[in-house]
Image: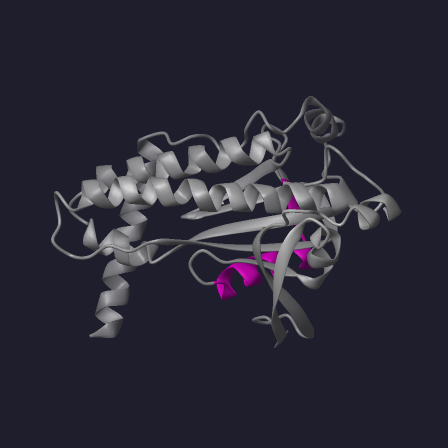
């Protein structure tokens, strides 16, 4: 029975993705990738790789598959919700100096620190966490609005949530597109760890790695979540933290030392 349900969801999500493409949702590449990055992309025809110390963020919608099942006869509403979610995320990421890397189904991937680099990527990490906090608040209003709308059409209870994972580290910056269409993206272990942290997080959580935590602790309240071993095919031990909120009084001495 479970296999039949999984097959049904897979087929439904495939049809949904095709419908999303037909409806022309926003493009993956956005104006918040600066002219400097565009120049970097187009400098050579061949694929080029550079490595930078960046902060990578993943956001993921909790219970999105269940939402697709509940709204299987109201796909247009689902698409409109996704469009508004993506637009909200894009605006916040751009305002905080980040770059929208891509949309992956109901996921958003962004990188921070490429345009405004400093010696240890602290600025990018701080901007990433500010963006995560702002999107968490903005999503609450968006979810509340759409839950009320969905209740007019379905009887099932609908509960979503926004999960977030953030990691900072050396990241490969690559143009993996074709000669006719460049596609700028970040790849590597830093990206994979950020993705796994988003998988680990609960609704409303912003989980950061120890590397990111060390760069933002002077500005944000963090709560240790302990050590996680082997993050889904990534071996090692990883200390992780939950971002609670911005500190009312950041550590000025720490800022001066930096």
Quadrant for residue 39, please give it: top right
Q: Residue at x 26, y 41 (%)?
A: 146
Locate residue 238 relative to residue 200 in the image: left or right: right
Whether residue 192 appears in magenta in the rendering, the answer is yes
Residue at image point 73% right, 50% down: 171
Q: Residue, x 73% and y 25% (percent of image)?
A: 36
**What is the residue that sits farthest to the front in this orientation?**
249
The spot of residue 76 in percent (x, y) is 23, 37
Chain part drawn in magenta:
185-201
Q: Nearer the viewer, residue 94 or 70?
A: 94
Residue 57's x, y, as percent?
A: 59, 49
Decide: is 17 above or below 221. Answer: above
Please check the rendered image and state whether residue 120 is part of the magenta-colored stretch, yes or no: no
User: Is 124 on the left or on the right of 200, as rendered?
Assistant: right
Residue positioned most to the top: 35
* Relative height, residue 258 to residue 193 (above, below): above
**Residue ID at (36%, 35%):** 83
Asked whether 228 or 187 is in front, the reply is: 228
Q: Return the residue nearer the eye: 184 or 193.
A: 193
Q: Is residue 230 visible?
A: no
Of 11 and 30, nearer the camera is: 30
Picture quadrant where residue 29 is located = top right
User: Which color mode does the image show?
Assistant: one colour
Name the side, left or right, on which 61 lies relative to 114.
left
* x then y, percent, for residue 170: 76, 52
Furthest toward the bottom, the residue is: 229
* Residue 106 picture location, percent across and down: 41, 48
Does the magenta stretch mainly form a helix, a strand or a loop? helix
Asked whether residue 12 is in view, the answer is yes
Which quadrant is the N terminus positioned in?
Answer: bottom left
Classify 186 as above or below 238. Answer: above
């Amino acid at each position: 029975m479970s296999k039949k349900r999984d097959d049904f969801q897979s087929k439904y999500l495939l049809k949904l993705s095709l419908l999303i493409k037909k409806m022309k949702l926003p493009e993956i590449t956005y104006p918040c990738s600066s002219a400097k990055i565009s120049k970097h992309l187009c400098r050579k025809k061949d694929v080029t790789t550079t490595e930078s110390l960046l902060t990578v963020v993943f956001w993921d919608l909790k219970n999105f598959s269940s939402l697709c099942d509940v709204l299987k006869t109201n796909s247009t509403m689902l698409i409109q919700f996704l469009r508004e979610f993506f637009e909200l995320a894009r605006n916040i990421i751009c305002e905080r100096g980040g770059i929208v890397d891509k949309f992956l189904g109901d996921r958003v991937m962004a990188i921070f620190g490429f345009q405004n680099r400093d010696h240890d990527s602290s600025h990018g990490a701080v901007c990433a966490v500010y963006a995560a906090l702002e999107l968490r608040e903005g999503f609450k209003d968006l979810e509340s609005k759409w839950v009320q709308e969905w209740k007019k059409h379905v009887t099932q209870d609908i509960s979503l949530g926004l999960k977030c994972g953030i990691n900072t580290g050396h990241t490969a910056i690559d143009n993996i597109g074709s000669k006719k269409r460049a596609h700028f993206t970040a790849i590597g272990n830093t990206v994979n760890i950020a993705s796994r942290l988003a998988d680990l997080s609960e609704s409303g959580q912003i989980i950061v790695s120890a590397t990111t935590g060390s760069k933002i602790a002077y500005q944000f309240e963090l709560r240790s979540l302990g050590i996680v071993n082997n993050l889904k095919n990534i071996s090692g031990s990883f200390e992780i933290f939950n971002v609670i909120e911005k500190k009312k009084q950041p550590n000025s001495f720490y800022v001066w030392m930096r």
